[in-house]
Amino acid sequence: MFNAVIKGVGSYVPENRLTNHDLERLVETSDEWIRTRTGIVERRICGPTEATSDLAYFAAQAALANAGISPADIDQIIVATETPDHVFPPVACQIQNRLGCRNVGAYDIHSTCVGFLSGLQVAEQYVKLGTHKHVLVIGADSLSRFTDYTDRVTCVLFAHGAGAFVVSRGDASGPKG
């Protein structure tokens, strides 16, 4: 059996910022109230033409570059999201196409907060068994698109962003991943 290691990491957040002071104009809250309860100062928010798949794509590119591998090396793509662009096709298939990967398994996982961890566990198993050398795991969401900006308890939490890991085969005698 092989070890599974994180070979590359990447992330992406949109340029637009939503600060605590911006939220003060939308709902009865304050910067102090938000900071003491969450530690959050600002959130990143997609522009009108940005989608969850865009966030995932840029994070994936960064992870592949960090890992020093090309899209042709990827054996599977897993995207954890609760905010896909469409019901069909999955975000993972959109990423597969945009990266120019060969025909490999690509699917979304919908497990709310534990989705990315679930994706990592699945990737680990494929790599440890030796069926895959490199699995791209992406967590991407644009949750504020569904946020109720009249609810001060939840609207201060959600934003947009993506993170990606390349989970790769490591030497069986090397460090555990």
Image (tube, helix red, strand yellow):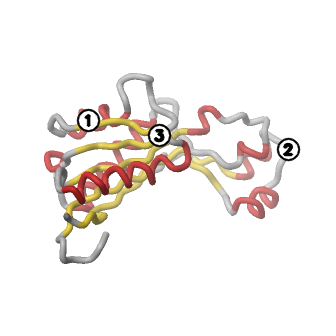
> Type of residue at label 3?
Thr
Where residue 87 sits: x, y (%)? 44, 23
Which label's residue is closer to the chain start, 3 or 1?
3
State the image coordinates of residue 32 (x, y, percent, origin top left): 80, 61
> Which residue bears the numbered disc 1?
98
Q: Is residue 70 left or right of residue 12?
A: left
Residue toward you, 118 or 165: 118
For image coordinates 81% across by 41% down, the residue present is 27
Left or right, 109 with reference to 71: right
- Residue picked out by circle 3: 81
Q: How crowded is mark 3: few (under 14 residues within 10 Å), some or many (20 or more)?
A: many
Secondary element at tag 3: loop
Picture quarter with the N terminus:
bottom left
Viewed as shown, does residue 147 lie left or right of 61?
right
Q: Which one is in front in this view, the residue at disc 3 or the one at disc 2?
A: 3
**Which comes sooner in the sequence, label 3 or label 2?**
2
Tally of marks: 3
State the image quarter where residue 128 is shown. Answer: bottom left
Whole-angstrom CA distance, mark 2 to mark 1, is 42 Å
**Residue denoted by label 2:** 28
Q: Which residue is drawn at 63% across and 45% down?
A: 158
* Picture coordinates of residue 63, whole percent (x, y): 30, 56
Pointers 3 and 1 in contact (CB under 8 A)? no
Please tell me whether residue 30 is drawn above or below residue 175 in the rendered image. Answer: above
